[in-house]
């Protein structure tokens, strides 16, 4: 495959980034951040999550926050929920709901993160399908946590990944749904560029009709190389976080890089001649605001490195 | 080309890293650092430079420092010199001397960095050849500064690069030498992965017999993706700095990433199944030591991200 002409970048910083902050962030600051992202040209922002406020205090204000943000008609506002109760909170709000169900390629990560082993998590598919059907949304997406490796379980083989996908896909079909999109998550930053290619090949070989989105982390410095590898295979959908917000709670040292930085990904794409629709100058203003909100420098490179002189990107 | 089986990584941290530190570093600390690098399996260390001590105070102790470091018989100790006077200091020492001559693809960068315009710099080739010939070393390498772009001049076209190379190669030949190796330096972090490929193609197409080495910077976050792109083209020689030491004096913000981090590059290679001969655990000990010497966290990712569980790399 050659490089694509155009990609879509899904911003996840306000949710995945802010959720791990120890300090309680002001609702107003988070609103200001999303309002500024509205100006960048990004067309999707994961803004908050409907989760247990005791476990994730920074997401406790989800409803209040959603009532306060400005809406850009060209932007989809997305949220995260980990159970049907959370989904029911989400459908009360003016947010975009995808029929996505989370599974895990790592058994131990699944247990630690959801208190269910990987197969138990897959076994929740029918109840998710039912919940989505009740609101008229097809359950057609699987998000796969720890697709490329796990800090608790170690290496995750391609066989494990494919087996997880086959089980999930079959269970969707048994419940009258069709798998149309896979989000492959490198939750703990294990992927390398050749593994990215092998995994994409295997999936496209078995199910050429399924779209693949990548959610990459830069924990060990290979995030942007992994994105480049995926672009070489024609992948056109990526999740990333402004500034590389998020850190990685599973890394060796607190403060390790989290999600790949949106501005570094946009910079990569624009330099490769791939259209993103994102204004890098506006995006760097968002990085600056994010740094002032969390009170520290973020791991993304472009803000400190600076834009290129006399280039349009 | 496929990925190579084996690469050689040339460590430049003690020189390119320490030279830009504002604080004066203790000779003993620098000695300790090099002695620790001796244990990693790296086979080349650029340890110091013979330059004006007023301009680069951290390199003023070059001779004293060289007398104090331990020597590993498997390691080449290299130095930098910017003029024939510096070369004459180097040949008095027990260091490896390559017949390398620096040129610049950017006219303005050449002037700022060497006080000579690009063509004036190329015009120094005959006197370098003569100086090398006097010590019996063939002048067979060109190092090209600002090959991929310049913070002062802007975009550097491939035509500019090829024109610089043709002039330099011709002048070497007029003086009885043969160009065997090119070191392409992304001095200010402008390269993108496709530009790396285009540049390598053009050079290999015109001179298939010339070896190419890459000196990459991670100023704008594409350093490791650029290394991956070069590996895909079969490139087997890279310069990098432990921890990403060095910063980038030309970046928008002081403290921007400098050279690509040796540990991230080794991690990339080993995960791609490419042999480096470097022990990553030992290398991370060097990063820790470097951070304690300069008194701050360094931009390399692997130390904070952590090694992979249950993998040998």
Image (cartoon, coloured by chain):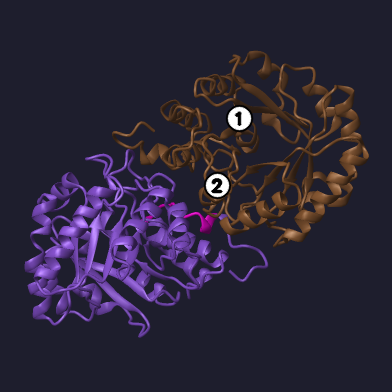
Chain colours: A brown, B purple
Marks 2 and 1, how far apart in space? 21 Å
Q: Position of residue B110 (x, y in %)?
A: 16, 50
Which residue is drawn at the image coordinates 44% and 65% (left, top)? B234
Along the horizontal axis of the image, is B198 left or right of A182? Answer: left
Q: Position of residue A156 (x, y in %)?
A: 72, 59
Secondary structure beneath label 2: helix
Q: Chain of mark 1?
A: A
Q: Quadrant of residue B124?
A: bottom left
- From this viewpoint, is residue A16 visible? yes
Q: Nearer the viewer, residue B283 or A184?
A: A184
Q: Quadrant of residue A252?
A: bottom right
Q: Earlier in the sequence, mark 2 or mark 1?
A: 1
- Label ID, residue A227: 2
Check the image and name the residue furthest to the bottom: B73
Along the horizontal axis of the image, is B276 left or right of B313? Answer: left
Asked if both marks, 2 and 1, belong to the same chain, the answer given is yes
Task: Give the residue number, with chain letter if any, for mark 1.
Answer: A14
Magenta residue check for B301: yes
Secondary structure beneath label 1: helix
Q: Nearer the viewer, residue A104 or B148?
A: B148
Q: Position of residue A52 (x, y in %)?
A: 78, 32
Quadrant location, the C terminus of chain B: bottom right
Q: Nearer the viewer, residue A84 or B63?
A: A84
Along the horizontal axis of the image, is B220 left or right of B95? Answer: right
Magenta residue check for A137: no
- From this viewpoint, is residue B12 visible? no
Specify the segment rendered in magenta: B294-304
* Helix, strand or loop: magenta stretch: loop
Which residue is drawn at the image coordinates 81% and 44% (left, top)? A114
Q: Nearer the viewer, residue A193 or A85?
A: A193
């Amino acid at each position: 495959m050659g490089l694509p002409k155009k990609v879509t970048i899904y911003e996840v910083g306000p949710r995945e980034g802010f959720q791990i902050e120890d300090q309680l962030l002001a609702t107003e600051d988070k609103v200001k951040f999303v309002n500024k992202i509205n100006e960048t040209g990004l067309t999707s922002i994961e803004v908050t999550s409907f989760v247990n406020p005791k476990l994730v205090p920074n997401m406790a204000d989800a409803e209040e926050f959603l009532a306060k943000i400005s809406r850009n008609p060209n932007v989809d506002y997305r949220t995260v929920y980990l159970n049907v109760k959370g989904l029911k909170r989400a459908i009360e709000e003016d947010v975009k709901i995808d029929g996505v169900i989370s599974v895990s390629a790592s058994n131990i990560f699944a247990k630690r993160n959801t208190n269910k082993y990987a197969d138990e998590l897959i076994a929740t598919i029918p109840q998710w399908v039912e919940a989505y059907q009740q609101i008229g949304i097809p359950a057609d997406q699987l998000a796969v946590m720890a697709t490329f490796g796990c800090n608790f379980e170690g290496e995750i083989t391609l066989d494990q990944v494919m087996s997880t996908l086959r089980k999930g896909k079959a269970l969707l079909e048994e419940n009258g749904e069709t798998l149309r999109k896979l989000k492959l998550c490198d939750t703990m930053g294990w992927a390398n560029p050749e593994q990215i290619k092998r995994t994409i090949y295997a999936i496209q070989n078995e199910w050429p009709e399924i779209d693949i989105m990548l959610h990459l982390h830069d924990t060990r410095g290979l995030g942007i190389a992994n994105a480049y590898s995926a672009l070489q295979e024609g992948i056109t959908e990526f999740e990333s976080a402004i500034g590389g917000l998020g850190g990685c709670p599973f890394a060796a040292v607190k403060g390790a890089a989290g999600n790949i930085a949106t501005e570094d990904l946009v910079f990569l794409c624009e330099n490769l001649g791939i259209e993103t629709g994102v204004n890098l100058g506006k995006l760097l203003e968002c990085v600056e605001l994010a740094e002032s909100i969390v009170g520290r420098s973020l791991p993304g490179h472009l803000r400190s490195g600076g834009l290129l002189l006399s280039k349009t990107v």
